[in-house]
């Protein structure tokens, strides 16, 4: 009986060759209008059929979404729907004043020149404030009254 047994791969190959070749029955595709003639009022439900190719479905959906103003308007409450690339760039003077920009963007020579410029701008302001301010008084070296010291002790209630 062992001699009569056929090798697995030979048997599989023989049965595969003997099996009738069946072509899958083609299911009817829904009749679709040409994509060029589609309007927002057109019926797009035929393009959503599972038998419709993905590429054709995408083209139809692009036509729907680009033609209908309802889908073309961005949502005003969606934070990422606006075009945020049209803003004004940061002015050069403000950029140089930012600490992060100083450490990353400026060369050593630019840093030194900026430090000198800031020192020159602040010097007249410091001199003017020193002239206007009254002379500082000598601090009084008086010790607090004994009554005040006792009232500030922790755990004691003020009377």
Image (spheres, rainbow, N blue to C red):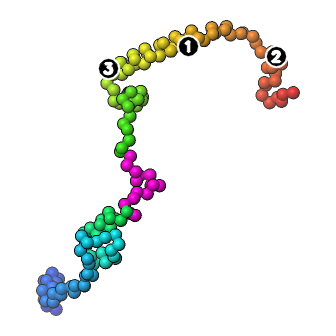
- Tag 2: Cα neighbours inside 10 Å, few (<14), some, or many (≥20)? few
Q: Between marks 1 and 2, how big is the CA–CA gap?
A: 39 Å
Q: Is residue 137 left or right of residue 72?
A: right
- Tag 1: Cα neighbours inside 10 Å, few (<14), some, or many (≥20)? few
Mark closer to the chain start, 2 or 3: 3
Residue 14 x/y as whole percent: 13, 86
Main secondary structure type of the part rendered in magenta:
loop
Q: From the image, state whether disc 3 or disc 1 is nearer to you.
A: 1
Q: Magenta span has 86?
A: no
> Where does the magenta region start and end?
70-84
SS of the residue under disc 2? helix
Residue holding disc 1: 129
Q: Which residue appears at 18% of the width and 85% of the height?
A: 23
Instruction: Depth check: give the residue in front, 148 or 61.
Output: 61
Residue holding disc 2: 146
Residue holding disc 3: 109
Mark closer to the chain start, 1 or 2: 1
Report the residue that reaches farthest toward the right: 159
Q: Between marks 2 and 3, how big is the CA–CA gap?
A: 60 Å
Figure disc tally: 3
């Amino acid at each position: 009986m062992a001699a009569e047994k056929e090798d697995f791969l030979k048997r599989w190959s023989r049965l595969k060759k003997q099996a009738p070749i069946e072509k899958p029955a083609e299911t009817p595709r829904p009749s679709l209008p040409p994509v060029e003639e589609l309007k927002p009022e057109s019926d797009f439900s035929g393009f959503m059929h599972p038998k419709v190719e993905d590429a054709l479905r995408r083209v139809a959906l692009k036509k729907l979404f680009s033609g209908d103003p309802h889908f073309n308007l961005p949502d005003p409450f969606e934070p990422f729907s606006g075009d945020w690339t049209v803003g004004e760039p940061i002015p050069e003077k403000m950029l140089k004043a930012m600490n992060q920009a100083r450490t990353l963007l400026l060369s050593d020579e630019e840093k030194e020149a900026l430090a000198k410029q800031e020192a020159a701008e602040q010097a007249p302001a410091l001199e003017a404030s020193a002239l206007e301010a009254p002379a500082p008084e000598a601090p009084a070296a008086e010790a607090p009254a004994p009554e005040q010291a006792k009232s500030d002790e922790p755990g004691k209630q003020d009377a």
